[in-house]
Amino acid sequence: MQQTILSISGKPGLYKLISRGKNSLIVESLDAAHKRQPAFGTDRITSLADIAMFTDSEDVPLMDVLESLKTLEKGAKASLDPKKAGGDELRDYFAKVLPNFDRDRVHTSDIKKLLQWYNILVENGITNFKEEMKPTEGDNIADREEKKAE
């Protein structure tokens, strides 16, 4: 099952895209409540499939980083608690996941957020990151042209 997992700036956690409205997206939180709510064009919404991590050579898609993290943790939640770990501890841990990450551009807060997101995804049974979280087709030009022809 392909699904789009979203991050909404200013709102904690992750959201699953449920539907598209005329002026909004209907999203469902991936926390314990699974509450549905609208997300508007004024919100800064980013699909996890569109995020990449900085490395010394080229950017690595977040899905690849999550797969590496899953391999390291053998599919379980992260063994390091991002809320309690210090900066050096987080960087040492992340070096096991992505050895050549750019230590200047990847901040401690980025690593914390990645670990929190990974734990949320695992708790919700989303562990096949490359297959389950592909970007959606959406309202691209071909779709609009097809609708005009009808």
Image (spheres, rainbow, N blue to C red):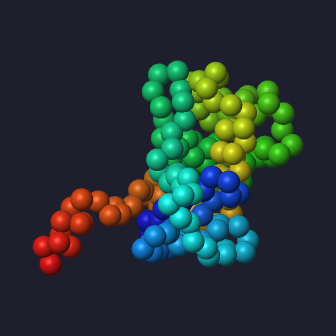
Q: Furthest-right residue in view? A: 84
| Near-viewer residue (44 or 81) | 44
Vertical placement of residue 68 versus 89, above or below: below
Q: Decide if residue 93 is in sight here.
A: no
Q: What residue is at 69 percent from the left and 38 percent from the top?
A: 111
| Near-viewer residue (112 or 36) | 36
Residue 84 drawn at (x, y percent): 86, 43
Q: What residue is at 67 percent from the left and 74 percent from the top?
A: 34
Q: Furthest-left residue in view? A: 149
Residue 33 drawn at (x, y percent): 72, 75
Marker count (numbered): 0
Q: What residue is at 70 percent from the left and 67 percent from the top?
A: 31
Q: Quadrant of the C terminus?
A: bottom left
Q: Quadrant of the N terminus?
A: bottom left
Quarter assignment of residue 94: top right
Quarter assignment of residue 53: top right
Residue 140 drawn at (x, y percent): 29, 60
Give the left or right position of residue 147, taking residue 30 as reference: left
Q: Decide if residue 43 is in sight here.
A: yes
Give the left or right position of residue 90, taking residue 125 as reference: right
Vertical placement of residue 67 versus 99, above or below: below
Residue 99 drawn at (x, y percent): 60, 27
Quarter assignment of residue 105: top right
Give the left or right position of residue 111, taking residue 134 as reference: right
Q: What residue is at 51 percent from the left and 39 percent from the top?
A: 52
Give the left or right position of residue 148, taking residue 41 as reference: left
| Near-viewer residue (148 or 112) | 148
Vertical placement of residue 2 versus 100, above or below: below
